[in-house]
Image: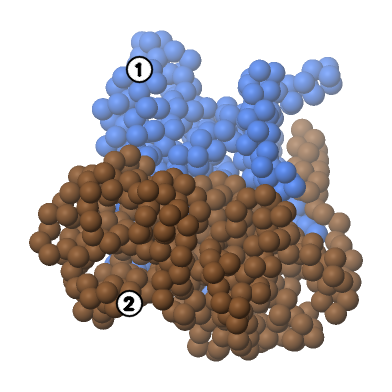
């Protein structure tokens, strides 16, 4: 079998998920791993939107908020299973992205960035202020997914941390697989074509507005699922998940690691999730270090960390 | 390519694993919002814990065992708080956790602590933290419901039956507004005008005018914290409303008098802790000794005035050390049992009496009704 870049990426991810636990000094690292995977899912969505289609969203945390609160509210109010709530949240996010994106993505330029910025803030305000429904800034409990108990019944007894580590890892690989398939499909080629030049893409018959909308809706679903997984894992969620800073974090992770490649973006998610844990000693300077890293990457490694490093290594090898 | 990437990631994963420390000490964990939007609560809490641990270790610790404080700053983010709680338990192997400055952070930590059966003493206000009672979860601040009750008790004593309310829409203000409306009926008081403002508003004269014009208003209550209550107080005087004004325990600090101005704040009443009136406490008051000692130590060390919030951390630490000393053990389960058996322990916030049904351990007597006179706090009795 020929080793395509797609297969290589998936194998690397699978190997990392399976082998990393052998290096864990304590169970705490399962938690960090699970967080990396959850962020990676959202960031994979950003790769599709920004890396493939060249559009920028500053409000993706809003969709994560919808996914998260769907898992908290739908089981409580409609009595549906939390797993179905994940699907419901994704559907609502997709619909909302479609409604917002449809008029805006007909335009060229940075309109989507501004519109999503507003959308993200609106969702965050709603979660904070609709107290009767969301219980406001103090947050709300999320029901247990129940999958761990099911696995236990089948003889697979995992601790809570281990379960979420492997489950989120699996979801991340699934998400990466879908994104890589998209990359190689006619739609993916159309997206990359319009990223290069919308005019040129249009002349070869690409429906630019429709393709951009498609990418936006798909990436909203990714963000929503990542929010759902975070909520189910934490069993408690506050409106912070939909906050503006979370949106910026997602974009930063993707850009830092390399927004053009799924593996690069996941690498960025891993670094930015680990950094606060490494920097606990000088937590006050965390933002400072983050900003500095970001600036240096933008100046010296413009494709993002991973692609730039790989290119350097390849050149050395030649 | 495979090798390089994997190598880089593995290096990252192992880079931040800290060497396990010697077990000859009592390891106490804390996750506190020392930075971020809740920093004005978390900063004095973190400083208080560091100060108290240093003080106790200088005296030789508990039965010769020193305390090692592992303190993380969660920035007020509940997701981070949960991660740090996991780290404290799994990696740092602490015997108890203090923290959770905000309600969201506390709710995130308590699930982890419950699972791991490690005692957790929360520093956040909401009643949901201890209701229903969870075996390993305790908290030190009184609830906003109790603040409402204390205020209404005072209003009842003064014979008020109709009041106006103006609340902030932030977490604190909105939660207290709901609690106050829930208990107000017990005191034969009716809320005839109920207004709100956004925490960032710069002027509340419109709402206050509306309250003034409501028929029969005898007093006004303002649940909220941050700058909002100061603006309400100033607007209140500018409109020359001559009804008594009540503030909440959310602004029980000298910063409030400074922000509102001594002139505008004259006559404002609020439920506060003994900490604000340390010098006015009677000699035989059981809280006097602990309150004066903490205030002097804190102000000496940080050169900033002591506040209610640092006091919550002080009490959490006091409850923890008291329990460890009584249990004579550093097993989390034994510490939990000892905390639940705490009786008559005088802290800065009040006198703690925990039981299997009550993991807050304070009653209304923990609040003192204070009045601002000539820019200083006085006791109303």
Q: State the CA–CA distance, disc 1 to disc 2.
A: 63 Å
What is the drawing colour of chain B? brown
Label 1 vs label 2, nearer the camera: 2
Residue A191 in the image: state x and y as whole percent.
44, 24
- B353 relative to B336 in the view: left or right: left
**Quarter-of-image position of residue B213:** bottom left
Q: Quadrant of the C terminus of chain B?
A: bottom left
Categorize mark 2 by other alpha carbons within 10 Å: few (<14), some (14-19), many (20+). some
- The residue where tag 2 is placed is B153
In the image, is residue A313 above or below residue B375? above
Is any part of residue B338 visible from this angle?
yes
Q: Are marks 1 and 2 on the same chain?
A: no
Residue A199 in the image: state x and y as whole percent.
38, 10
Residue at 66% x, 74% y: name it: B289
Categorize mark 1 by other alpha carbons within 10 Å: few (<14), some (14-19), many (20+). few
Q: Secondary structure at mark 1?
A: loop
Q: Chain of mark 1?
A: A
In the image, is residue A242 above or below residue B294? above
Residue B252 vs residue A21, the one in the foreground: B252
Residue B298 in the image: state x and y as whole percent.
68, 58
Q: Chain of mark 2?
A: B
- The residue where tag 1 is placed is A108
Q: Quadrant of the N terminus of chain B?
A: top right
Chain drawn blue in the picture: A
């Amino acid at each position: 079998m020929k080793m395509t870049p797609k297969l290589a990426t998936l194998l690397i991810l699978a190997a990392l998920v399976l082998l990393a636990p052998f290096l864990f000094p304590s169970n705490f690292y399962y938690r960090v791993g699970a967080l990396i995977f959850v962020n990676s899912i959202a960031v994979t969505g950003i790769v599709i939107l920004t890396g493939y289609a060249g559009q920028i969203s500053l409000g993706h945390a809003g969709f994560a908020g919808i996914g998260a609160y769907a898992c908290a509210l739908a089981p409580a109010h409609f009595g549906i299973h939390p797993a179905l709530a994940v699907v419901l949240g994704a559907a609502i996010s997709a619909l909302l992205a479609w409604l917002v994106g449809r008029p805006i993505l007909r335009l060229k330029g940075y309109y989507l960035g501004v519109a999503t910025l507003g959308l993200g803030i609106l969702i965050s305000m709603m979660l904070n202020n609709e107290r009767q429904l969301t219980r406001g800034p103090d947050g709300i409990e999320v029901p247990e997914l129940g999958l761990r108990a099911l696995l236990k019944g089948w003889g697979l007894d995992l601790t809570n941390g281990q379960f979420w580590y492997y489950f989120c890892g699996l979801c991340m690989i699934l998400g990466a697989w879908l994104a890589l398939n998209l990359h190689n499909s006619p739609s993916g080629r159309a997206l990359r074509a319009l990223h290069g030049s919308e005019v040129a893409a249009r002349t070869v018959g690409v429906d630019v507005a429709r393709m951009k909308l498609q990418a936006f809706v798909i990436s909203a679903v990714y963000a929503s699922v990542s929010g759902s997984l975070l909520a189910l894992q934490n069993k408690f969620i506050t409106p912070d998940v939909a906050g503006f800073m979370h949106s910026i974090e997602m974009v930063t992770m993707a850009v830092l690691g390399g927004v053009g490649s799924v593996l690069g973006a996941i690498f960025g998610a891993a670094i930015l999730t680990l950094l606060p844990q490494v920097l606990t000693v000088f937590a006050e300077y965390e933002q400072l270090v983050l900003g500095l890293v970001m600036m240096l990457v933008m100046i010296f490694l413009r494709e993002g960390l991973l692609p730039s490093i790989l290119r350097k290594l390849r050149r050395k090898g030649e | 390519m495979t090798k390089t990437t994997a190598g880089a990631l593995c290096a990252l994963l192992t880079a931040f694993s800290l060497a396990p420390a010697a077990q000859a000490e009592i390891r106490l964990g804390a996750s506190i919002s020392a930075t971020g939007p809740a920093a004005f609560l978390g900063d004095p809490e973190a400083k208080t814990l560091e100060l108290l641990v240093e003080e106790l270790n200088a005296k030789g610790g508990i039965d010769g065992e020193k305390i090692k404080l592992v303190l993380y700053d969660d920035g007020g983010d509940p997701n981070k708080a949960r991660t740090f709680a996991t780290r404290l338990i799994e990696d740092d192997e602490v015997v108890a956790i203090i923290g959770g400055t905000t309600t969201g952070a506390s709710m995130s930590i308590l699930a982890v602590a419950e699972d791991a059966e490690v005692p957790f003493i929360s520093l956040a206000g909401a009643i949901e933290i201890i209701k229903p009672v969870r075996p390993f979860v305790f908290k030190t601040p009184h609830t906003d419901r109790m603040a409402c009750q204390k205020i209404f008790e005072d209003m009842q004593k003064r014979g008020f039956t109709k009041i106006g309310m103006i609340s902030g829409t932030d977490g604190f203000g909105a939660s207290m507004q709901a609690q106050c409306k829930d208990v107000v009926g017990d005191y034969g008081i009716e809320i005839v005008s109920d207004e709100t403002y956004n925490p960032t508003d710069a002027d509340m004269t419109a709402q206050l005018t509306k309250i003034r014009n409501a028929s029969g208003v005898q007093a006004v209550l303002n649940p909220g914290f941050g700058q909002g209550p100061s603006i309400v107080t100033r607007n209140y005087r500018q409109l020359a409303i001559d009804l008594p004004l009540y503030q909440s325990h959310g602004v029980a600090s000298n910063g409030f008098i400074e922000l509102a101005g001594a002139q505008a704040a004259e006559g404002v009443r609020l439920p506060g802790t003994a900490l604000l009136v340390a010098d006015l406490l009677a000699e035989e008051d059981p809280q006097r000794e602990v309150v004066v000692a903490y205030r002097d130590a804190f102000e000496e060390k940080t050169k900033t005035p002591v506040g209610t919030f640092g006091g919550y951390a002080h009490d959490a630490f006091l409850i923890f050390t008291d329990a460890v000393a009584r249990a004579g053990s550093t097993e989390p389960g034994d510490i939990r049992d000892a905390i639940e058996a705490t009786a008559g322990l005088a802290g800065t916030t009040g006198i703690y009496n925990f039981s299997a049904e009550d993991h807050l351990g304070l009653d209304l007597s923990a609040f003192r009704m204070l009045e601002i006179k000539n820019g200083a706090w006085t006791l109303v009795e």
